[in-house]
C-alpha cells in the first residue's frame, strides 16, 4: 500500500573535544573529535511528489536556507534515488530548530532525518550500512547524526566509534545572529597557526582524543568534564567574531562550569552543574537581550516517528 507521508527526526551536536591536525596537501585536516548529540532536534516529513522540493519552517529564522538542489535534504533524497534506481520524487518539509551555520551540524541533521524518511516513504529498504555510506558521502557530520549518543570521530569526523557516557549533561546554548562558514573558520585557523608557528606547540598531523575526557564521560561527572572541553577552532572563531569572547566570559562568570564555541561556531555552549543553574543562566542571557536555550545531552540519533 502506498505510504502518504513519513516523518523522521535527527539531533544537532556539540563537539566536546575538537582537535584539528595540520593542513594536508589535499586541503583537508585530520580531526579527532568527541561528538555528543543534544536535545535540539530537526524534524523532516517526506511526502510523495513528482519532483524534488523542500520547505523550511520552525522557531528560528529559516529565510536564508537555500531551497536549491544543493540543500542537504534534497541531496539526501537524490542520493537514495541514485542508489536504488527509484524513479519518483519527494517533497520534504523541515521543522528547523538547530541554528543555521552555527557549528551544531543542523544541515547534517536534516540530511540524516531525510535519509530515514525518504527510505521509508519509498520503501527502498536500504540497510543500515548502505544508509551510513550515503550519509558519509553527504557530509562528515551526517553519520554522527544518524547514530547520535556520544562518539569519537576521526578522519574528517565520519570514522565513528561509540563512547560510553553515563547520565545526562545540562547545557545552555547561545546562538549568534551571524553564522560562520566552516571553511572560513578552518582557513582562519591555518592562517593563525602559520603566523604564530614559533610561539605555539607544533601542530600534529593526526590528533588524538584525551583519555581524561573519556573518563569524565564514563563517570557522568560534569565538573570533571568541564576541565577537558577543548576546541582548536575556537581561536579562529574568536578572531572572526570577537564578541563571542564576551559571551563566553559572561556565561562562565554566571554559573557555567565551562563555556566553549561549538564546532566551527559561532554558537557558544555552556556546561552547567545542574538544571537550576541552567534555567538561571537562560534567564540571565535573555534579560541581557541574547537568545539562550537549555538542552540536554546525550540523546539518540535519527529515528522514524
Ligand atoms: P557544521 O557544524 O556541520 O559544520 P553548521 O551547523 O555550522 O555545520 P549548517 O547549518 O549545517 O552549518 O549549514 C551550513 C550551510 O549549509 C548553510 O549556510 C547553507 O548554505 C547550507 N545548507 C544546505 N542545506 C542546509 C540545510 N538543510 N539547513 C541549513 N543549511 C543548509
Image: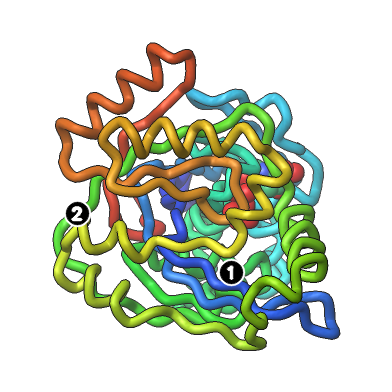
Give the residue drawn at x 15%, y 31%.
Answer: 276
The picture places residue 36, in percent across and down from the top left corner, at 37, 60
Judging from the image, the colouring scheme is rainbow
Q: Is residue 18 left or right of residue 240?
A: left
Q: Which sits earlier in the primary sequence, circle 2 or circle 1?
A: 1
Residue indicated by mark 2: 168
**Ligand 1 neighbours mark 1 (CB distance < 8 Å):** no
> Is 281 located above or below residue 212 in the figure?
above
> Is 246 located above or below residue 9 in the figure?
above
Q: Is residue 120 visible?
A: no
Q: Is residue 105 left or right of residue 13?
A: right
The answer to whether the residues at label 2 and label 1 have Cβ atoms under 8 Å apart is: no
Residue most extreme to the front: 199
Q: Could you tell me how far apart the alpha carbons at marks 2 and 1 are, in whole angstroms?
A: 27 Å
- Which is nearer the eye, 176 or 40? 176
The picture places residue 49, in percent across and down from the top left corner, at 66, 42
Name the mark nearer the viewer: 2 or 1. 2
- Which is nearer the eye, 117 or 208? 208
Residue indicated by mark 1: 135
Amino acid at each position: 500500500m502506498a505510504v502518504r507521508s513519513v516523518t523522521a527526526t535527527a539531533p544537532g551536536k556539540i563537539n566536546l573535544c575538537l582537535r584539528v591536525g595540520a593542513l594536508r596537501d589535499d586541503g583537508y585536516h585530520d580531526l579527532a573529535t568527541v561528538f555528543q548529540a543534544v536535545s535540539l532536534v530537526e524534524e523532516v516529513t517526506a511526502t510523495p511528489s513528482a519532483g524534488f522540493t523542500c520547505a523550511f519552517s520552525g522557531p528560528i529564522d529559516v529565510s536564508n536556507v537555500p531551497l536549491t538542489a544543493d540543500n542537504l535534504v534534497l541531496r539526501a533524497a537524490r542520493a537514495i534515488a541514485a542508489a536504488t534506481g527509484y524513479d519518483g520524487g519527494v517533497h520534504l518539509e523541515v521543522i528547523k530548530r538547530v541554528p543555521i551555520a552555527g557549528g551544531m551540524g543542523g544541515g547534517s541533521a536534516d540530511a540524516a532525518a531525510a535519509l530515514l524518511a525518504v527510505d521509508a516513504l519509498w520503501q527502498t529498504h536500504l540497510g543500515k550500512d548502505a544508509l551510513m555510506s550515503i550519509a558519509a558521502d553527504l557530509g562528515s557530520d551526517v553519520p554522527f547524526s544518524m547514530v547520535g549518543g556520544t562518539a569519537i570521530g576521526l578522519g574528517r569526523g565520519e570514522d565513528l566509534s561509540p563512547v560510553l557516557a553515563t547520565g545526562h549533561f545540562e547545557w545552555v546554548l547561545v546562538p549568534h545572529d551571524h553564522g560562520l562558514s566552516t571553511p572560513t573558520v578552518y582557513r582562519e585557523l591555518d592562517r593563525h597557526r602559520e603566523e604564530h608557528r614559533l610561539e605555539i606547540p607544533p601542530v600534529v598531523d593526526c590528533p588524538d582524543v584525551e583519555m581524561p575526557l573519556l573518563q569524565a564521560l564514563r563517570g557522568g561527572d560534569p565538573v570533571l568534564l568541564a576541565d577537558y572541553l577543548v576546541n582548536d577552532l575556537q581561536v579562529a572563531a574568536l578572531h572572526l567574531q570577537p564578541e563571542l569572547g564576551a559571551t563566553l566570559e559572561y556565561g562562565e562568570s554566571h554559573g557555567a562550569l565551562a563555556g566553549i564555541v561549538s564546532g566551527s561556531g559561532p554558537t557558544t555552549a555552556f556546561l552547567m552543574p545542574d538544571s537550576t543553574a541552567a534555567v538561571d543562566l537562560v534567564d540571565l542571557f535573555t534579560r541581557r537581550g541574547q537568545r539562550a536555550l537549555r538542552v540536554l545531552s546525550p540523546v539518540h540519533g535519527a529515528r522514524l516517528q
